[in-house]
Amino acid sequence: MKFYFSTRQIPALRHLPLTQRLQQVQLAQAKLTGPEKLLLNVLKLVILIPIFVLILRSGQEWTSLLWAFLVATAFPLLLKPLQYGLCNKYLSSPTQKES
């Protein structure tokens, strides 16, 4: 599986404007199988739970807020490439659309 950091990097969507690319990714995401959806949701939890734990610890240690911010910024950096990579196989290439 190849990781894409932007929808512009996906070969099947390269020629489309942003709104259509996002719409196509959303349609492809609806086609994900159960285990793929489960994988994405578990990864979301693995990233979100430490954020809330760090926020709760901020009363004892103010630096935990900085760590929570760093983990929150890592959320899209880790999750979006995986999401685009999983959705890529459900996107039809431009040559398949024409025939």
Image (cartoon, rainbow, N blue to C red):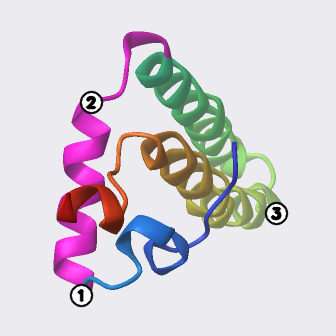
Characterize the local packing of mark 3: few (<14), some (14-19) or many (20 or more) Cα atoms within 10 angstroms.
few
SS at mark 2 in the image: loop
For image coordinates 53% across by 56% down, the residue present is 80
For image coordinates 55% across by 22% down, the residue present is 39
Towards the viewer: 45 or 81: 81
Residue position for label 2: 31
Q: Quadrant of residue 64?
A: bottom right
Decide: is 78 above or below 70. above
Q: Which label sits on residue 81?
A: none
- Give the distance between the C-alpha atoms of the residues marked 3 and 2, in whole angstroms: 41 Å
Characterize the local packing of mark 1: few (<14), some (14-19) or many (20 or more) Cα atoms within 10 angstroms.
few
Decide: is 70 above or below 78. below
Disc nearest the viewer among 3 and 1: 1
Residue position for label 3: 63
Instruction: Say which amino acid is labelled 3.
Output: Thr
Which residues are drawn in magenta? 17-35
Residue position for label 1: 17
SS at mark 3 in the image: helix
What is the residue that sits farthest to the top in this orientation?
34
Instruction: Say which amino acid is labelled 1.
Output: Pro
Percent across and percent down for residue 28 are 28, 43
Percent across and percent down for residue 77 are 65, 63
For image coordinates 52% across by 40% down, the residue present is 86
